[in-house]
Image (cartoon, helix red, strand yellow):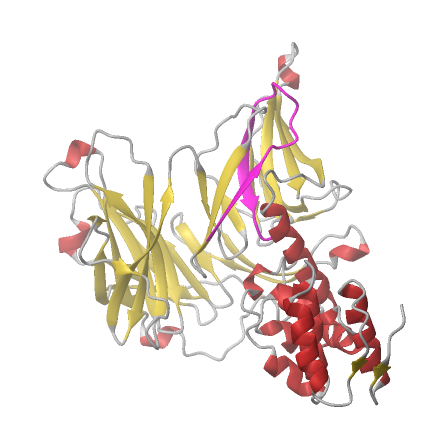
Amino acid sequence: MNFEVQHEDGDSARILLGIFEVLGGYSRPLVSSSSSYYSELCNMVSTSSPLSSFAYEMMRSLNLLTLPIELIPLIVRGASLRELYNLTRTCSQLYHLGRTSRQFWMYASDQDDLPLPTGHTIETVPVDQLIYLAARAISISDAMNQPVMKPKRSFVYASKFYGQTINMLGLPGNSWYIEHIKNTSRIRIKRAESGWNYIYLDLGISKTVHAFKLLFPDERKGPAPPIILNRQEIALSDRPFDLTLDDEILLAATSNRRNVRLANYVQKLGFILRFPDRLASSRGFWISSLSINKQIRKIIIRTANAPTESPESGRLIHKFHIANIPLDLLDSDDSPDVSQSSEIDWSERELEVTHAFDVPVWPSPNIVQLPRHLPTGAVHLADFNLSEEDTLEDITTTHLGSLFLCEDRLLAFHVRDLDSSGVDHFARSAGGASIVTGTYFRDSSKIVDLTILNAARTRVRSCHLTPPVARGEPYGIEAFNSLHGRMFIKSYRTSDDETSNGEVYYAVQY
């Protein structure tokens, strides 16, 4: 085909030539010395083949290239990962920008879908990796849209045999996990990846709380263990529950799950925060979850207790308590002293609860539908399920809600409903993994339906898959990581030799 392309900029001319090719040989000459070429492209895109979306990105790139390169990340702010990735494929200049500019990807509307490696955020991952992570995110999204997801590969990453108990805890990114063999002090960090089976970091810790800062290796460069940058032992008088730990703050429920431990282990200052007696004296009262929001200096505590009118019914009343963080707990610029144990100076005081919210029974006039745009200044506190009225019928719908704080007032919204009949529901955590509540063994011949809730963007994704397990071999799903397209399953193998019986753990990559 012959093309007549006129433009002072050789690169732009080559881009226009590429558009002709993408659109399947649109053979009319195109004169691009004025803005008329842009409207010409619009007409081409509107009447073109299935590749018109890609051609649209090319068309948009022509306008972008007339601007200073430093303005482009500002202009594409809010675009999706797919749109940004398509832009990088239109010409060498935008490809180079995608390889070298972190800001180009920072404000993608769905940047929390990037499958970041363990130990990294979008601010710390090597900038040249971002374009490949975006491509991977698109590939995983497309795979989840298939009628049945097809695995790329699967491998065994752990096993335990008759009489052996191994506790495993996935780390953010679900590439690395913590392995603890019960009744031993052997605690290791290992990677769930083929070829890394014998690579691990032995933490060698005792039965107290330890804060570690780790440097994870570049997984592209071959097997290597993480490195401990610093560690600190935190002595507690009793076993903590639902523990949260960051660079300075420890938050946990006490051993009886009726009070809160909150400490700044940098300052070695801690508080045991008691609920008012009128609350803690309720029958069956216990703390079910804890979180902290430093932005608004609040602790978010979820409690459960049996109803006073029918304590034997098995129902639980759930309530959120929003309490102040003690003023002097976050006001230190000191660096942690990692050379010695943290002998925290503990004192007791009553929780300063500022707001409370009873999770209502569905339907409730106190819950309205989540608006398209949240009020200015609204801060997300927690998510919850609304319980149904007592009924003899099977409950087939799960009602999801979210709690916000705005201008010193609690706002509760109904987010969406999920069909609960015969479907496994997963709530995606910040690390990307969705843990199954109560693993059970399944028939390996049946398709599994999964529903994943991304609470950060109130988005639900569904997918269908058949794990690569031998027919007739029972298996259970441990977790599904929608960020990294990875599922963790365990199968139970039996043989005539009882000592050879045990569970085998697989990672399945999609």
| Residue at image coords 54%, 55% | 431
Q: Is residue 203 visible?
A: no
| Residue at image coords 56%, 40% | 168
x, y percent for residue 131: 71, 66
| Residue at image coords 22%, 66% | 355
Residue farthest toward the top in the current orientation of the protein: 496
x, y percent for residue 284: 21, 42
Query: Considering depth in this image, is 82 or 251 the residue closer to the camera?
Result: 82
Q: Quadrant of the C terminus?
A: top right
Residue farthest toward the front in the current orientation of the protein: 28
Q: Give the quadrant of residue 252.
A: bottom left
Magenta-drawn stretch contains 475: yes
| Residue at image coords 21%, 49% | 363
Drawn side of residue 134 relative to residue 424, left or right: right
x, y percent for residue 257: 31, 48
Residues in magenta? 460-483
Q: Quadrant of the N terminus?
A: bottom right
